[in-house]
Image (cartoon, rainbow, N blue to C red):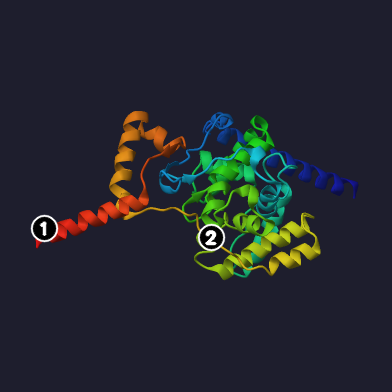
Amino acid sequence: MNKFFRNIFILITSFILLSAISIISVLWTYSNDLPDYKFLKSYKPPVSSKVYSGNGDLVADFSQEKRVFVPFNSIPKNVINAFLSAEDKNFFKHPGVDAKGVIRAVINNISNILSSKRLEGASTITQQVAKNFLLTNEVSLNRKIKEAILAFRIERALSKERILELYLNQIYLGSGAYGVAAASLEYFDKSIKDLNYSEAALLAALPKAPSRYNPYRDPDIAKFRRNLVLKNLLDNNYLTSEWYEKLTKEEIILKKNKKIYLEDAQYFIEDVRKSVIETLSYDKVYKQGFNINTPIDLNLQTIATKSLRDGLIAYDK
């Protein structure tokens, strides 16, 4: 009997050693072929330049991606809590990869496969930063391994606050909005410092599927997803039961960012665009977020355009 248990012990020990060697071998292989992540320490995302009329009305913006950069210390707690509850509740505890989350996803996915349901992911916010900045959207085991290794490295190089700052300013949230500040303007026409928990939860609901959960496209499914995030906030003790019940009953009230873009001013705006690009360069105008004040009076511009159009029509007669 002792010999039997000794053989079992040897088999188990051998299996563990072989598994460890295999894992180390895989990690070593992938570690030698990864993109450089160190630029993330000083990375500044491209932000749009905005054009204002003489009355202070926003008339246009020049951008490759609609984004307003917000430093971490200016992002309110309710927004941070909503995204952590929706995407990575253990963010401040794990070293880049959430082992508990991975095990939970594996167990749940066995059931999902059997019932033909959508597979559940287990990417932490740090892994999403690695994917969004350094990798592709390829769905493969290779990418997941690289993503995990990069997440560990990023966690050692950057603070948790910096990682969150990168994530919350880079993430795509639908309707052309990148980052929480641009999304707050796009959906509610307000600064993120003025968002309530219901609005913050809606934004936090969008990263999983920005098009599907877009409240302009389908308010009902957006509300359903928002309420799931509110439930996570309740479970994580950010909301009381009474507050949660109240918020889940609220309808989604949208107010699109006000931008006065008149056809009558398009030639003027194009002249402004060419002029500032010639003065500053294309990259600066489209990536560094200038506020461009112009003397244009939109009312007078409309009157002038109408007069010109009427004059041309009369001349043709």
Visible in this render: residue 250? yes
| Residue type indicated by callout 2 | Lys
Figure check: 70 above or below 192: above
Q: Residue 192 placed where, x, y %?
A: 61, 49
In the drawing, does residue 115 fall left or right of residue 65?
Answer: right
Q: Residue at x 64, y 53 (%)?
A: 195
Residue in the foreground of this view, choosing between 307 and 248: 307
In front here: 2 or 133? 133
Residue 282, horizontal then vertical, whole percent: 36, 34
Residue sitting farthest toward the left: 317
Q: Which mark is residue 255?
A: 2
Mark 2–mark 1 CB contact (< 8 Å): no
Q: Position of residue 165 (x, y in %)?
A: 61, 39
- Above or below, 130 against 189 in this view is above
Among the 4 quarters of the image, the one containing residue 28: top right
Q: CA distance from mark 2 to mark 1?
A: 43 Å
Residue beneath label 1, please?
Answer: 315
Q: Residues within 10 Å of mark 1 (few under 14, many from 20)?
A: few
Name the amino acid, label 1: Tyr
